[in-house]
Amino acid sequence: MIRIYFAGSIRGGRKLAETYRELIDMLRMHGEVYTEHVGNEEALRREDVNRSDRFIHDRDLEWLRNSDMVIAEVTVPSLGVGYEIAMAIELGKPVLCLFHKNSTHRLSAMISGSPKVSVRLYDSISEAGKQIEGFISECRERGLASKPE
């Protein structure tokens, strides 16, 4: 079973929270998603009250280290997501960044210009799902993720 680190904006803005939840639901079909809370508003509220920033940072870095890949929704600009992507690259993890085609934002050149990041555009959840499927298949072919059990 593959271990997936999903990244999406939390403190940078939650306008795509429902999209995150749907993407996480798709990712669960492929493996364990360490960061399911990104798509769960109630879990995030509990976490903000019950966890220190240091705890969250250290826990998330441990999840990154233990993951097989990182899949990030990067339409909403987020310092934290950028940090997670940079750490994943540093750790040698395959990284997929999903960006909505109709966004009013421009994707950072530090993401779109990185040869270590696979950027895929989408305009619907089903299209994002196809992009995820393709990325996971590519990772499996390259031996970067385990085959389905």
Image: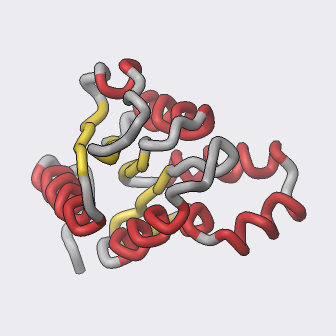
> Please, is residue 98 above or below residue 1 in the view?
above
Q: Residue at x 10, y 53 (%)?
A: 141
To which quarter of the image does residue 32 belong? Answer: bottom left
State the count of labels: 0
* Nearest the eye: 30 or 7: 7
Q: Residue at x 43, y 43 (%)?
A: 75
Residue 83 position in % (x across, y down): 56, 32
Quarter holding the N terminus is bottom left
Residue 74 appears left or right of 49: left
Residue 101 appears left or right of 58: left
* Nearest the eye: 135 or 18: 18
* Nearest the eye: 136 or 75: 75
Q: Residue furthest left?
A: 141
Residue 119 position in % (x across, y down): 26, 38
Q: Is residue 32 visible?
A: no
Q: Residue at x 89, y 62 (%)?
A: 49
Residue 50 appears left or right of 72: right
Q: Residue at x 41, y 24 (%)?
A: 108
Residue 67 position in % (x across, y down): 45, 54
